[in-house]
Image (cartoon, rainbow, N blue to C red):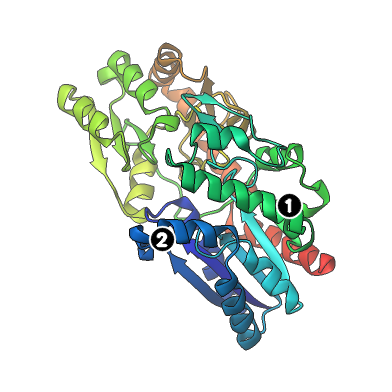
Amino acid sequence: MRFVFAHNRYVLRGGEDESREFEISMLRARGHEVFEYVVDNNDINRRNLVSIGIRSVWNGDQYQRVRTFVGRTKPDILKVDNYFPLLSPSIFEAAKSMGVATVLSVRNYRLICPAGTLFRSGRICKDCIGAKFALPAIRHRCLHNSYLQTSSVVLSNALSRVRGTWANSVDQYVAVSELVKRLLVSGGFSPKKISVKANSIPDTGPGDGSGKFAIFVGRLIEEKGIRTMLAAWEKVGAKMPLKVIGEGALAGLVQQAASESPFVEYLGRKTLKEVCELIGRAAVLIFPSEWLEPFGRSIVEAYSKGTPVIAANTEGMRDMIEDGTTGLVYRSGDSDDLAEKVLSLAGTPERLERMRDRARERYLKCYSEEHNYSEMMSVFARALANN
């Protein structure tokens, strides 16, 4: 098969970029042709934000460019990972006008929440789900605290509904989890057009947990539960030291905690290879996110190494963590409960070892490359059938 993978790169590289590149390499390794159509947010001219905002609603220039690219490459399917803000929903109609099936990966909540997070003012927020025009988001400036950027997403979603872009020009949505599918359906999207396919990572083999430390991997931002995690480590301390990998607005807070405690270490950004090696040596992965995390990529990285996970008990994590089997869940936002769960595993190495085996089994069953490829090809078959 022949594919065009279209993507609007973010300023900060994240798990979505890693997952997209993994899918491309997986398809190419199996003899499929994949052409990439990529634009980059680093190319945005900050002096022309109004123009960018207008074009993010509907970009006629990208409509023509994608038509030309599709006409030259002649793919069976246009697969889109992120279209905002430079590509816009116009690219789906461009592909459909050329008779090409379309697939949109949904790894955040932008289709039903202009901020993409369902999180505002320190709490989960579902005010805009199902709204034809998301006025609460504009009122609260939910995207980057900006009326302009928030309004651009609101207008884009509203126009795409009115034009029928979401209903008629996307043949298959690929929700990264059952949670994302449930929320899309509650937002008015047809369940018949939504497949669920988890992200995957290459199998680098199990680790041994010999480091006897806990590890966090992710963006250092409010909704990730960083403050709760650091507060918990005031109680955990030497029983299980904490290593923190990542960047973000709360990096300074983590650096301060590391300077005040010998049992917290801030490692900054690491390569994927380095991350996997450290996770393999860790006793547990900490996943303290307090928003409705669509998918825990670092959880899959942990499972691949046989490392159990201690996660906040949010809706999405209840789908990924088998409490007491592949890890533990604690009351979201409760640092005392998190500390108690960490200490319970630190004091029971036999239980921890059993969890390592179950975590590795979960990876092989649900997140391996072969499983991912099989699910992906099923998605593409449904898209072609809907075209």
Question: Quadrant location of residue 254?
Answer: top left
Against 41, residue 340 (above or below) is above
Q: Which residue is mark 2?
A: 41
Q: Position of residue 231 (x, y in %)?
A: 33, 18
Mark 1 residue element: helix
Q: Position of residue 125 (x, y in %)?
A: 58, 28
Q: Is residue 19 left or right of residue 250?
A: right
Q: Is residue 325 visible?
A: yes
Q: Which residue is mark 1?
A: 161
Question: Quadrant location of residue 109?
Answer: top right
Residue depicted at 51% across the width and 31% down the height: 140
Circle 2 crowding by C-alpha within 10 Å: few under 14, some 14–19, many from 20: some
Q: Is the N terminus in the top left, top right, bottom left or bottom right quadrant? A: bottom right
Circle 1 crowding by C-alpha within 10 Å: few under 14, some 14–19, many from 20: some
Furthest-left residue in view? 259
Residue type marked 2? Asn
Q: Position of residue 59 (x, y in %)?
A: 57, 67
Residue depicted at 32% across the width and 31% down the height: 213
Asked whether 37 or 317 is in front, the reply is 37
Residue type marked 1? Arg
Q: Is residue 202 visible?
A: no
User: Foreground mark, 1 or 2?
Assistant: 1
How far is disc 1 from disc 2 in space, using C-alphas?
A: 25 Å
Mark 2 residue element: helix
| Badge 1 or badge 2: first in the primary sequence | 2
